[in-house]
Amino acid sequence: QVQLVESGGGLVQPGGSLRLSCAASGSIGRFYGVGWYRQAPGKERELVAGITSGGSTNYADSVKGRFTISRDNANPTVYLQMNSLKPEDTAVYYCNARNIITRDEYWGQGTQVTVSS
């Protein structure tokens, strides 16, 4: 069983930066892919960024060049560095961990990110 707790959300002006953290209660090492999703009001949840246990990353086109996902398996924690934020980045951001062997999936409770002047 894995529990995920996000932090780091808040209100930021356009062009600003935030760093989200996702702390895992259990090991999310070699058998887990992890990712950040977001859901804006009235929209479906979408993948923002993902990272494999080996460190390979993928990003939504809308955030490429602005967001960076990273992971620290020793702690274990997953980060999302968000730069050059835009109003359209406003959403609740969720951390996700998926076991690549069992397909078990875990979600955090979400953290609100609001980009507004």
Image (cartoon, grey):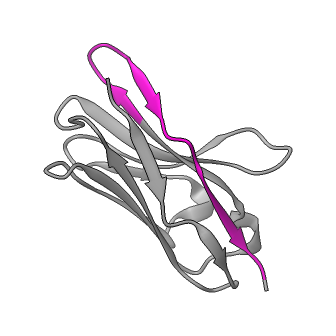
Quadrant in the picture for residue 43? top right
Q: Is residue 101 magenta?
A: yes
Q: Where is residue 95 drawn, in percent x and y?
A: 47, 45
Q: Nearer the viewer, residue 10 or 64?
A: 10
Q: Quadrant of residue 80?
A: bottom left
Q: In which quadrant will I find the C terminus?
A: bottom right
Relative placement, left or right, of 78 versus 84 is left
- Based on the picture, tell me whether residue 73 belongs to the magenta stretch: no
Return the x and y of residue 57 as percentages of the image width and height: 35, 51
| Residue drawn at 75 percent across, 38 percent down | 44
In front: 111, or 58?
111
**Image height of 111 relative to 15, above or below:** above
Q: Is residue 107 visible?
A: yes
Say whether residue 82 is visible: no
Name the residue at the left extreme: 74
Stretch in magenta: 97-116
Give above or below for 84 relative to 53: below
Answer left or right for 99 relative to 92: left
Residue at 62% across, 76% down: 85
* Between 99 and 54, the one nearer to me in the picture: 99
- 29 above or below 76? above
Estimate the x, y position of residue 39 in percent, counting from the top left. Answer: 70, 47
